[in-house]
Image (cartoon, rainbow, N blue to C red):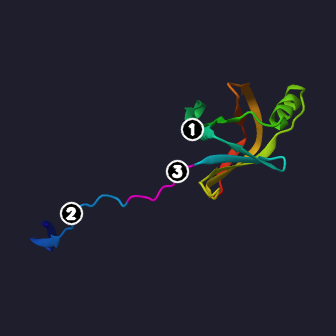
Amino acid sequence: MTRAWPVMAGAAVSWLLVQVEPARAAEPVATVSPVAYTLQYGGVTYFYKGCTGLGSETRIDREEHGRERFRVKLADLVCTRALGDAGLWDWRRQLEQGHDVRLDVIFTIVDASLGPIAQWQLTRAWPRKLVLGDGTEEVSFQYDEFRRLR
């Protein structure tokens, strides 16, 4: 497609003809469906069948004198697995007894060959909520911050 663009040269206006390529759709990004999720904490790797919720949102509040304050709210990471060993329940019980046993957690999304698709570090995480379901455990992790590692 040819387009004409006006060009100023002194007092005269001339037209510049430019060959423009038609817009193309973005190239699709190769994706791999996650098969499982792992959480590493306390020196052990645990497998989960589903995890959702990792993220954050930011709100800007206006304070006196026009200052702005950024408030970040971190969403819980909620993971589900088949009923497993008692390690998670023991960790939760320690918190209920008032012990500060927050841990750094590595959260990984893995493919069918257990290769990492993506990975995050959750700093000072702890199991905020733990619920027994129909042969499953659902845990909600809170954390102080997170960052993507890969």
The answer to whether residue 126 is left or right of residue 28 is right
Question: Which residue is drawn at the image coordinates 15% and 66% (left, top)?
Answer: 5
User: Separation of disc 3 and disc 1 at Cα?
Assistant: 29 Å
Label whose residue precedes the other's in the sequence (2 or 3) = 2
Res 22 label: 2
* Residue 48 in view, yes or no: yes
Residue linked to disc 3? 33
The residue most toward the front is 135
Decide whether the magenta segment is chiefly helix, strand or loop: loop
Look at the image and tell me in which quarter the N terminus lies: bottom left
Going by the numbered disc 2, the residue's amino acid type is Pro
* Helix, strand or loop at mark 2: loop
Kindly identify the residue that appears in the image at 62 percent across and 58 percent down: 113
Q: Give the magenta part as a residue range.
A: 28-34
Indicate whether 83 appears above or below 5.
above
Rendered residue at 59%/48% (across/down): 35
Q: Residues within 10 Å of mark 2 (few under 14, many from 20)?
A: few
Nearer the N terminus, badge 3 or badge 1?
Answer: 3
The residue labelled by disc 1 is 58
Residue 78 placement, left or right of 59: right
| Camera-side mark, 2 or 3 | 3
Residue 79 at x, y percent in the picture? 66, 37
Cα separation, mark 2 vs mark 3, equals 33 Å
